[in-house]
Image (cartoon, coloured by chain):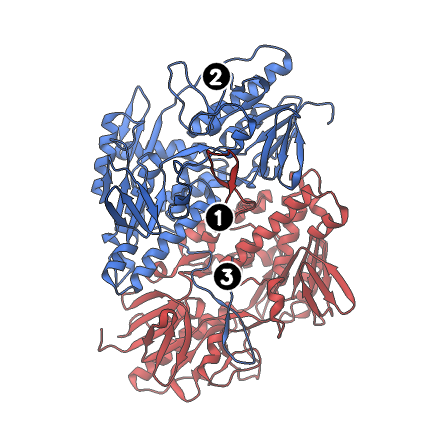
Chain colours: A red, B blue
Amino acid sequence: MSARPRVVIVGGGFAGLDAARGLRSADVAITVVDRHNHHVFQPLLYQVATASLSPGDIASPIRWILRRQTNVSVLLADVRSIDLDRKCVVLDHDEHLPYDYLVLAPGATHSYFGNQQWSDYAPGLKTLDDALTLRRRMLLAFEEAERESDANRKRHLLTFAMIGGGPTGVELAGALAEIARHTLRQEYDAIDPGSARILLIEAGPTILPSFPQTLRDAARRALRKLGVEVWENAKVTGVEQESLRLGTDHVAAHTIIWAAGVAGAPVGRSLGVPVDRAGRVIVRDDLSVPGHPNVFVAGDLAGFTHQDGNQLPGVAQVAKQQGRHAAANIRRRMAGTATVPFRYRDPGNMATVGRAHAIADFGWARASGFLGWLLWLFVHVMFLVGFRNRLSVLLQWGASYTTYQRSVRLITGTSTSPPSEIRPADGRSSDGTSH
Amino acid sequence: MSARPRVVIVGGGFAGLDAARGLRSADVAITVVDRHNHHVFQPLLYQVATASLSPGDIASPIRWILRRQTNVSVLLADVRSIDLDRKCVVLDHDEHLPYDYLVLAPGATHSYFGNQQWSDYAPGLKTLDDALTLRRRMLLAFEEAERESDANRKRHLLTFAMIGGGPTGVELAGALAEIARHTLRQEYDAIDPGSARILLIEAGPTILPSFPQTLRDAARRALRKLGVEVWENAKVTGVEQESLRLGTDHVAAHTIIWAAGVAGAPVGRSLGVPVDRAGRVIVRDDLSVPGHPNVFVAGDLAGFTHQDGNQLPGVAQVAKQQGRHAAANIRRRMAGTATVPFRYRDPGNMATVGRAHAIADFGWARASGFLGWLLWLFVHVMFLVGFRNRLSVLLQWGASYTTYQRSVRLITGTSTSPPSEIRPADGRSSDGTSH
């Protein structure tokens, strides 16, 4: 294996996986490094967060996904920095991973626009753990409200605020409204889950700015029909424990979710090359790092400006194409031929709004409502990794659509502190907290 | 609602649910209280722990299970104690829940035979959180071993010890062996998962003492064929961090699981009535608490001695029948008729050993091997709550059987500490731990 060029791919997301696959038949030794052992189908994270799907439905072990590819090995590790001079990736435990070619695809993290402290009160939704934490908080909010006698506190518990009117915020708001207005409605006595306030707060003039006007309007109508309060031109100026500030206005909300800004993963800065305002590495048009033709950046960390002058959005389709393109350019460099500039082929854009409504923009055609939802369903199921996941997810959605039931409404992660063992001496329980 | 007798059921497990259902048509106001919002199908917990099934496959929200029963409401709360004199259940937040009839069915917890400190190093498997913690530990053990250069440390990481040779220990050991010897085998380079040591340690003379001799032997053979080391007459005298003591022997094991003793939930002692050595409340033959004919105990907390002098085991079948019987006796007391003693109808006993092998004892008939496994499959699927769960679980098992793949091999709960946001000033990542 020592004679073959070593390719290190940082990140097992859409870009990293497609880069690995793109080198399937190349004579290289690939190592894929990720801090998680699984690949997450991020577009459906909001469904895990709203108890519609299980983590297992949208995630698969990276080792399992790449099991048939013989030239790749997988490492579970945290990448601390990239040493471009020594050509190695620095991991946790001070381990060094040397490379001949590098594809840096660690994705994005949340940006709080300089207000790091807000992250304690308004978590984001980028990983499975984020989704499970949100699910837990949401379900507990209803349970606590059921036991709460103070009317104001009850209303506060039943207020959910989504900050950011892009697809993530819209999809979360829609799904939350469905669960409150339909799924949970019959199951509580002291509260009416249908009276929950769901706020979608967007600083700019409109939600879903990346969609054409007609589809934005369709989405806004659908959200309002579900009872979501859509606030546009509403800039959040402060986030505290269970409370938001918009200028002089204060809003008390037990659950606040951040879907407003992303930034390139911090490891991008360790390269020491220019990054844009959102922390994305400014790449050359062949996706390589200026001055380092063997190092490529793909996915959400890549700050790529298209020929038309627009920055590419951080969506799955872009990441997959860039991953594949980086792999192709590595093969070209190995063969001694010139690399080719990246050209994005936009397959379209979609977002769901509630249970059976979606907007879909394919450029030459648009759809909204139930038809849009069928298209969305088809596309997402086909892109899921693994046949069993597809069947399982179709099963869940089929059941949800016909019955409104959310089958994964489990509060895990210790709702209360259980006692762990009897103490024979005094007979009282010992309270132990568990993970 | 105030005129109707109030029935409080503590616990939404097998006994509590069947007690609630048994009062479906009674003119009562029922409150089911549980510290978790979901009912777990405990017999399959080991499959969540070994990454074969998702939590959502074996658990359902209690509210959802009881949604069609109009005389029941559900409360998520921790029960601190029972005040028999004032006839109320004391909850967390100092809330008091008065009752006219009480069914106490909180289940069992782990007993470390007086060595409470062992619980830090040898957790048990009673809740979904237990299962997810174990799954995480198991998967991380393989990942860490892959990166470990020291041979002893590597062997230590790949050693798994199950303390307790009852069905739980046997099923866990078998499932772990399958995952190491088959599922993970192809996916690692630096380690051979198949070389993992899996120890099943039983203090008594034989594993599975509740099964007839021929079936015990069949199980032992199947375990050994899977490479499990079955240690009988092996009494654990000490448990420390990643290490076991058996008299003068020391065994280093990164993962130690306790499946050796259970005790009635601590709330049982708060009754102030006699309990047996395992903390179970000694009930009268109609399942009521001596001196308190309106209070019943059902399930793992009930210390019930059958006519033949044997104590009933803490298994699902016993809990379900007792729950139903307690409900029937409540109806009799409401009607002013005499209560009836409980009689257990033993439907049989089963345990799996690995992927497609099980032992099944129906008294008049026994089965082992593949046939035993088909029977086990059928029984467990039928008893799962909810059609969608049944279909989903059948799907998972069908795929596992044909492909050996474990689809839920996800490490969640933060394998490493991810940076939370870029600090523009110094460019270094900030490490934040998440839940």
Q: Nearer the viewer, residue B4 or A179?
A: B4
Asked if badge 1 and badge 2 are on a common chain, one would say no
Given residues B62 and A383, the one toward you in this image is B62
Q: Can residue B83 be seen in the rendering of this structure? A: yes
* Residue assigned mark 1: A434
Q: Specify the label residue B342 is tagged with.
A: 2
Residues at circles 3 and 2 in contact by the CB criterion of under 8 Å: no
State whether discs 3 and 2 lie on one chain.
no
Nearer to me, B361 or A356: B361
Circle 3 chain: A
- Compared across the picture, whether A212 is left or right of A18 comes to right
Which mark, residue A6? none
Residue located beneath label 3 in the image: A127
Is disc 3 surrounded by few (<14), some (14 to 19) or many (20+) residues within 10 Å? some
Which amino acid lies under the numbered mark 3 shown in the image of this protein?
A: Thr
User: Which chain letter goes with mark 1?
Assistant: A
Q: Amino acid at mark 2?
A: Phe
Q: Chain of mark 2?
A: B
